[in-house]
Image: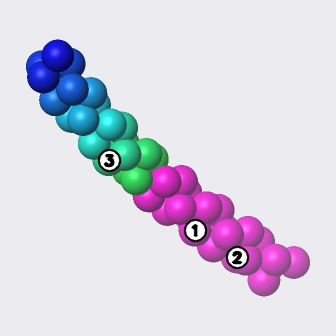
Amino acid sequence: MQQAKSSKARYSKGFIFENCHNLNRIAIALRTLVRTYQEKLKSL
């Protein structure tokens, strides 16, 4: 019983960490997209 509990906690922690990492990557991608979009608008 104790073993399953600890592995579940470890999994949820890793899951949260993965989600934060993915959100970070999405934010960076969005920032670069916006930057390139603004550059294109300036050149118009």
* Residue ID at (32%, 47%): 17
Q: Are marks 3 and 1 in contact (CB under 8 Å)?
A: no
Quarter occupied by the N terminus: top left
Q: Residue furthest bottom?
A: 42
Q: Which mark is residue 11?
A: none
Q: Residue furthest front?
A: 1
> Which callout, 2 or 1, points to the residue nearer the camera?
1
Our reading of the magenta stretch's main secondary structure is helix
* Residue ID at (61%, 61%): 30
Query: In the image, is residue 39 part of the stretch drawn in magenta?
Result: yes
> Which callout, 3 or 2, points to the residue nearer the camera?
3
On the picture, is 33 further left or further right than 18?
right
When the figure is inspected, residue 8 is found, relative to residue 25, above or below; the finding is above
* Residue kind at label 2, given as amino acid type: Glu
| Mark 1 surroundings within 10 Å by alpha-carbon count, few (fewer than 14), some (14 through 19), many (20 or more) | few
- As measured in the structure, the alpha-carbon distance from the residue carrying label 3 to the one carrying label 2 is 33 Å
* Residue kind at label 1, given as amino acid type: Arg
Q: Which mark is residue 39?
A: 2
Region rendered in magenta: 23-44
Q: State the residue position of label 1.
A: 31
* Residue kind at label 3, given as amino acid type: Phe
Q: Secondary structure at mark 1?
A: helix
How far across and how far down the image is residue 44, in percent?
87, 78
Let me know if residue 20 appears in the view: yes
